[in-house]
Amino acid sequence: MSTAVAEPQARAPEPARAERNYLNVSFGVMSWLFTRDHKRIAILYLVSITLMFFVGGAFAVLIRLELMTPEGDLVQPETYNKLFSMHGIIMVWFFLIPSIPATIGNFVLPMMLGAKDLAFPRINLASWWLYILAALVMLWAVIHGGVDTGWTFYPPFSTDATRTEVNATVLSIFIAGFSSIFTAMNFIVTVHRMRAPGLTWFRLPLFVWSMYATSLILVLATPVLAITLVLLALERLFGVGIFDPKLGGDPVLFQHLFWFYSHPAVYVMILPGMGVVSEVISCFARKPVFGYKFVAFASLAIALFGFLVWGHHLFVAGESIYAALVFSFLSYLVAVPSAIKVFNWTATLYKGAVSYETPMLYGLGFIGLFTIGGLTGLFVAALGVDVHVTDTYFVVAHFHYIMVGGMVMGYMAALHYWWPKMSGRMYPEGWAKLAALIIFLGFNLTFFPQFVLGYLGMPRRYHAYAPEFQVLNVLSTAGASILGVGYILPLIYLLWSLKYAPAAGPNPWGATGLEWQTASPPPPHNFPETPVVTGPPYQYQLEEDARAD
Amino acid sequence: MFAQMRLFPERASTMADRVDALFLFLLAVTGTMSILIALLVIWFAVRYRRGARGRYDPRLKGSILVETLWTVGPLLVFLVMFFWGASVYFRLYTSPEDATDIYVVGKQWMWKIQHPDGQREINELHVPVGQRIRLRMTSEDVIHSFFVPAFRTKHDVVPGRYSTLWFEPNRVGTYHLFCAEYCGTWHSRMIGSVVVMEPAQYQTWLDSHAEGSLALEGRKIFLKYRCLSCHNTSGTPHGPPLEELYGKLVLLEGGKRVTADEDYIRESILQPKAKVVAGFRPIMPTFQGQVSEEEVLKLIAYIRSLGRGETPPRVEETPPPIQEPAAESPGGPNP
């Protein structure tokens, strides 16, 4: 008895639905499209990126169907090349990068700080409008034939050889970049200036630390992408010789510039997921995160070292072998903070009181899949092995384990964890657990065979392939169809829950963050009065201690 | 479909064993780590499930000792991986002195290969077993990548520069050759095979495919473009003589020195004004867009082969293709 878990006292009965909250405070399309409430903007983002996720996913379905057979028999090679290019571009810039920051972060970050809103509500709204503008330009490009350069736009293919819609696509990514910068800048200022009284840096939830690290990367790296894309456009439109050797340029220069943004961006695509997992593991193990400061500083270390490893994408591109040596070494260094995080999450479970609600299932799944994704990173960081596996399916599997196995699992964890807060309703637990299981199995069946394919030597971006690779490709396609079902299920039951599910109450998980101390859905300005923080985060207690308080 | 299936690629070069050894080491270490973490997560999640009595203790918040151990421990293991990986990489990318050069030109979407004795092939590369081969590669258009999985090696083939790749095949057979850098519509058809043969059979193959040697082909091109008008050994040539040039240090205008290697010679043909030899004026026109990459390779082979006194006598009397620099006053060759 003495070691029983303190159940939250806040599990209110039915909250009065008539209470004024951010959803019923005003009505009509305009009240949403021009809202300055961070919660409504988060919902706008949620709807938009969900749409883009399924567009990008549809491209993936066609890719996997084509790869069922070794012959290129379902679509033309031009079409196939556009499919994987558009899949990558949409998933990276229109889903993964905004995913957790712009939806979940937008919604909960100000509440975690005890703030009424972000520092610059209008800039927050502008960020969403820029995202929509970028998405529209992108869709225009898709309708006008799409782009076939891959998401990496390597010249001279992208500047000289291709005849597809590179200009519009590059413009769209340029615009989307400003949307990222706006959100990130807003987060940085908000974390610095708008913490509740008593909320010191080391009392911040780890999700805030990860959002802060993510925002630093976005603010510092995205301008480099913008500059690189402008240079690409200058060469394409005016024949300025920057990258094309025929004009006196250097194609490898582009790769340096591109990865100077895109490798840090890889950490933008995983740090937020790590932040979510810290919250979820702590909540469902009823324990503070083990080694809080180490996890917090690991996020900053990843953000810092992440800027110094771009050259590991160029080990076979012709950079000097001594440069390669430095980049390989730094790549191993950046793996250390990731390892620290995995160990700390695991240790958090030790002597916990673990329960297995859906967010926790995704959280535990994240640890497993991120570990595989991270550890296979040690293979590609090893110079001698990277020469063989780079540009093969090994790399495809590696980064999908990080970005889908890691980030998308983290996103799903976050969506289920904060869904009661966002919607005021519980999602159906049974269906959600089933979907989590389907996603976990489908994901592994899709991407694990690709490690084997990669070491066998199957190059990526191949429309047709040698017959001996077929069995593994069929397995992968089978997994993808299971994964597809897993992603459609939440779409259905979450929408269903908006109308039919029971009300959640302010704190259905008995969690400790400030966001759980206000109503679900929260009132327009989050808190009736500004909360005051008196202790560190994650103060889960034994029942006797709770009673004594 | 199942009959041809493999789970591990075949090995056909000396480096393949080294790469595989490193790979298996990484697999063993990371495999152990993954299983360990998975078991711990499952064990903790079950043993410390909610409702299990007498085990819950939320006061456990961390330990500097444990954090240090699992920071330093992995770092040490990573250092081993780093050094091992680096040593394999150095061997993979440092070509031995005694290797035989074969020239590769990538273009959308084929591999064009020229042997030193002039044999030419497309999408096939015949090599003898047990001999070190060095590929000198460039591209006519976009970036490609020369990838032979059975040799565990690849290198990007970048336009505007020469990339090298070497290997020593140690098993007779036919192996996949893939383009590994996305290069457009038929990227997945830019494939071929590397045929590793017994030396005797390889000689037979060479003999049956004999054409003029690369250097001989290069000589024809040298004459065709009237390079001889300037690069001759008469008393006062317009351009520097090329005999015994390859591999030497060249003194440039401005005092810099450069080794006359493939890249230098290629650049001097395509962008002659980039590096001007000391004592000569920048009057050579560019041949960019006039000579193909394959012709450049042949010219290099010819210049490499050019020994003392082997420059042909200047016979034809057509004017040299000199482009007068606009800024300089016209005039004859330097006295």
Image (cartoon, coloured by chain):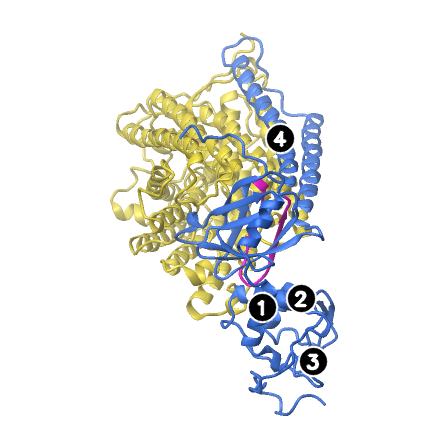
Identify the residue at horizontal 62%, vertical 72% (top origin).
Answer: B268
In the image: residue A503, left or right of residue A542: left
Is B233 situated above or below B69? below
Identify the residue at horizontal 51%, vertical 25% (top origin).
Answer: A281
> Of marks 3 and 1, which one's residue comes earlier in the chain?
1
In the image: residue B28, left or right of residue A450: right
- The amino acid type found where label 4 is placed reads Leu
> Of marks 3 and 2, which one's residue comes earlier in the chain?
3
Question: Does any portion of residue B154 appear in the rendered image?
Answer: no
Residue wearing tag 3: B233
Residue wearing tag 1: B218
Q: Position of residue A32 (x, y in %)?
A: 30, 45
In contact (CB < 8 Å): disc 1 and disc 2? yes
**Residue B161 magenta:** yes
- Whole-angstrom CA distance, mark 4 to mark 1, is 46 Å
Is residue A38 or residue A160 the one in the foreground? A160
